[in-house]
Image: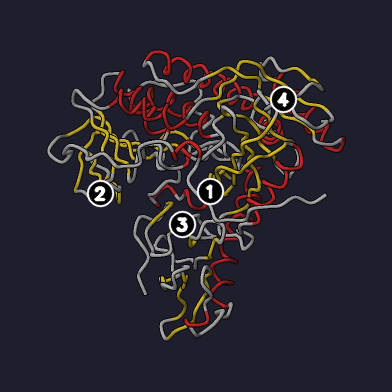
């Protein structure tokens, strides 16, 4: 059976659309020395800032856009320790000890979110819900069983069940009760309001460009230089090359839609265990469906990703209208554990938090709990498991494959001929790689006929960009930087815009 599908480009997420989009003018942050400078105003950065401030630190948060305006505002808004099949994947690679740390840290993060929302009086529609990882068909049951076994070994009170509140049959599921759903933008901005004031500052509209280690450290930004005794890089993808994180993190994009449907909506937080991911929850009278992940810069980044999610929703629910379409980007580490701790070995001044594998609302909170203690000069029982400087011989083959692909993309895109040498042949609403006397440029023609042309050389490490038709952006297949059609930075690690051509 076929269904009518509305195929359009990405729009703002459900969580961001109704919120104030204006960047607040920040007070001057140039004439003071702070205890901690946090780069990035997402859930990891803002939670770290609040916990550090509660610990007695004077904190400044530097955010290029609006607090929670990045991936923290573009997700399915689940905070849970049951995360698809993450626990069984960690167990297979690292064993029971690391799995136990990850599971208990995630469970503690769930409770930390609930506690902070209550303590700060944040109205963010927070509610307890059961989380499910379900088998859409019999072939996925072993994955569900393995996740249940890993969760139980890690101390999580999961149960196996066939009762999932979805309008289609499932072969089985693992369930974990008392997890959270909420409105992530209202939550993170509520935390930011608790950070700002009494000597601490949340500075929006300022992009961090570089960090000079020292006493104090100096953070060079688009608004001047900020001084701080310690720095936390919580920019989602680390922006400093000194830790070589670009070689250890793999960025992946995923997509989501919201739909107004007639009839009952699921009340649980469900995600499928198979390779065709479908992440499901409701918000008010809306159904949220996520999935369709792919590596950033992949040639299959087209609007068909949204169409497939819409087709799935229409197949199983009586859809009245698709109300929102959005996407997000998440880095995953080479060994399937987040990276949280000193940016380089033995550093006590610069720290990092990244690699949350699409579970950043939980992972970012967990990271903040670790960083609070490290910033305060204390140890933390989870820190060694997530140390950015850990070594694992078992992960060497994956690391080698990741970087071999980067090399292939770097060379292959340079050898590939341009699509055309004639800018006038680029159709409205589409983009082409155009050859000229200076090599290749990316040309997009909008529906009004205006041509937008930029250099295709990523300002991070020089890989050539590819057009993402679903979101009308130029994306880097090597390390995940993204730029709009006029060259402005959308996602790091790049911090400089593309050359206009």
Dot 2 falls on a residue whose secondary structure is strand
Instruction: Answer with left or right where residue 330 lies relative to residue 218.
Output: right
- Residue closest to the eye, 224 or 292: 292
Other-residue count near label 1 (Cα within 10 Å), few / some / many at <14 / 14–19 / ≥20 = many
| Secondary structure state at the residue bearing disc 1 | loop
- What's the mark number on residue 482? 3
CB within 8 Å, label 3 to label 1: no
Q: Mark 1 vs mark 2: which is more N-terminal?
A: 2
Label 4 belongs to which residue? Answer: 150
Q: Position of residue 85 (x, y in %)?
A: 70, 33
The picture quadrant where one finds residue 81 is top right
Q: Which residue is mark 1?
A: 248
Alpha-carbon span between mark 3 and mark 1: 18 Å
Mark 2 sits on what residue?
221
Q: CA distance from mark 3 to mark 2?
A: 19 Å
Query: Does the residue at mark 3 contact the one at mark 4 (Cβ under 8 Å)?
Result: no
56 sits to left or right of 292:
left
Q: Residue furthest left?
A: 31
Depth order, front residue of 401/48:
48
Q: Is residue 213 visible?
A: yes
Who comes first in sequence, dot 3 or dot 1? Answer: 1
């Amino acid at each position: 059976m076929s269904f009518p599908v509305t195929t359009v480009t990405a729009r703002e997420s459900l969580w961001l659309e109704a919120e104030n989009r204006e960047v607040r003018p920040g007070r001057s942050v140039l004439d003071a020395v702070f205890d901690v400078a946090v780069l990035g105003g997402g859930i990891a950065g803002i939670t770290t800032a609040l916990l550090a401030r509660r610990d007695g630190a004077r904190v400044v948060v530097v955010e290029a856009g609006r607090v929670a305006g990045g991936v923290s505002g573009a997700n399915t808004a689940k905070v849970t320790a049951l995360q698809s099949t993450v626990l069984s994947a960690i167990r297979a690679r690292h064993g029971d000890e690391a799995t136990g740390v990850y599971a208990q840290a995630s469970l503690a993060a769930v409770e930390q979110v609930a506690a902070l929302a209550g303590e700060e009086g944040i109205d963010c529609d927070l509610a307890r819900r059961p989380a499910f990882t379900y088998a859409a068909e019999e072939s996925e049951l072993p994955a569900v069983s393995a996740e249940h076994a890993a969760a139980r070994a890690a101390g999580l009170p999961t149960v196996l069940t066939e009762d999932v509140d979805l309008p289609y049959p499932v072969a089985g599921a693992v369930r974990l009760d008392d997890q959270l759903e909420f409105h992530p933008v209202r939550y993170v901005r509520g935390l930011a309001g608790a950070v700002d004031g009494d000597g601490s500052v949340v500075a929006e509209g300022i992009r961090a460009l570089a960090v000079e280690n020292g006493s104090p450290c100096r953070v060079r930004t688009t608004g001047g230089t900020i001084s701080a005794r310690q720095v936390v890089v919580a920019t989602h993808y680390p922006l400093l090359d000194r830790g070589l994180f670009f070689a250890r993190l793999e960025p992946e994009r995923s997509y989501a839609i919201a739909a107004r449907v007639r009839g009952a909506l699921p009340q649980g937080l469900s995600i499928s265990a198979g390779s065709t991911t479908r992440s499901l929850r409701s918000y008010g009278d809306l159904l949220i469906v996520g999935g369709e992940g792919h590596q950033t810069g992949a040639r299959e980044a087209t609007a068909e990703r949204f169409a497939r999610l819409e087709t799935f929703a229409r197949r199983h629910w009586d859809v009245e209208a698709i109300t929102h379409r959005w996407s997000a980007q998440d880095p995953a580490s080479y060994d399937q554990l987040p990276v949280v701790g000193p940016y380089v070995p033995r550093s006590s001044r610069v720290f990092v938090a990244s690699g949350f594998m699409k579970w950043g609302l939980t992972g970012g909170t967990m990271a903040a709990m670790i960083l609070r203690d490290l910033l305060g000069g204390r140890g933390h029982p989870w820190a060694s498991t997530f140390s950015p400087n850990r070594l694992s011989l078992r992960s060497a083959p994956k690391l080698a494959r990741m970087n071999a692909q980067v090399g292939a993309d770097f060379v292959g895109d340079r050898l590939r001929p341009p699509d055309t040498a004639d800018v006038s042949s680029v159709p409205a609403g589409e983009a082409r790689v155009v050859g000229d006397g200076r090599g290749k440029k990316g040309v997009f023609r909008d529906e009004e006929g205006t041509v937008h042309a930029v250099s295709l050389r990523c300002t991070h490490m020089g890989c050539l960009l590819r057009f993402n038709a679903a979101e009308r952006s130029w994306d880097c297949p090597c390390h995940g930087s993204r730029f709009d059609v006029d060259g402005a930075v959308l996602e790091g690690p790049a911090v400089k815009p593309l050359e206009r051509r």
